[in-house]
Amino acid sequence: MVRTHSSRKLPILLGSMLLVAWSTSCLCTQVRCGGGYPPPAFPVEELLLDESTFPEGWHAHRDSYDPEDRLPAEQIALGLHINGCGPYSLGAGQYVYRFFDGAEEAATAYRTESALWFSAREGWGPWGTPPELPYESPVADQFRLACCADQTSSQRFCQAVGQYEEYVVLLDVDMNPEYPECMDFNDLERIVAAVDDRMASHLGKNTY
């Protein structure tokens, strides 16, 4: 059988196509197809706060929980803390979501989550920013911090939502004004500022 000129080119053509496909796959792995952010140089878990950020009596909750995946993020980390202060058990949760398609997708997720997190809660008063806590994030691209109170008790619930480039960070904290030694607004401001510091450090931003 006589090989034609075109038949001799076929293996070369197939090899070139495979090389292009392999090169494109490697590029997409490093920079994410679609123009997103490259993989970070640190695990997303490094953005979680540790026990030293919280008042005395608080400690990390060692039981494992799956983070809420209602946001379409490729990486999610969850940190939970509880306290042994006062007669009531209080808790705090921090969620970190990273979106591989970048800041635009994170901005959309921020708006969705902010509307959900600050929606009306049955039996609780309206969301508002306490005058004792006039904190504005110097790091986040978008940020909101607000609290609401239980209408039948002294319990108070505060939440913060921030977008930091391709990340969205959620923070919720239980408070009881009758036991300020367990968690007061100064403590909460320090915790929120610690989130900003952690994000600024890992993203190479200034906190001023």
Image (tube, rainbow, N blue to C red):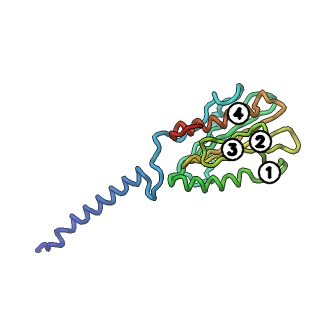
Inspect the image, locate mark 1, and give the three-letter code of the amino acid beneath it: Arg
Q: Secondary structure at mark 2?
A: strand
Q: 184 left or right of 140?
A: right
Query: Which one is in front in this view, the residue at disc 3 or the one at disc 2?
Result: 3
Q: Is residue 206 above or below residue 179?
A: below
Residue bearing mark 2:
157
Say whether disc 2 or disc 4 marks the residue closer to the N-terminus. Answer: 4
Residue designated by label 1 = 121
Mark 1 to mark 2 CA distance (whole Å): 11 Å
Q: Residues within 10 Å of mark 3 (few under 14, many from 20)?
A: some
Image point (14%, 72%), residue name: 5
Earlier-in-chain disc, 3 versus 1: 1
Q: Alpha-carbon distance for marks 3 and 1?
A: 16 Å
**Residue 33 x %, y %:** 43, 57
Q: Position of residue 92 (x, y in %)?
A: 70, 38
Which of the two residues, 161 or 152, is positioned nearer the viewer here?
Answer: 161
Q: CA distance from mark 3 to mark 4?
A: 18 Å
Which mark identifies residue 160? 3
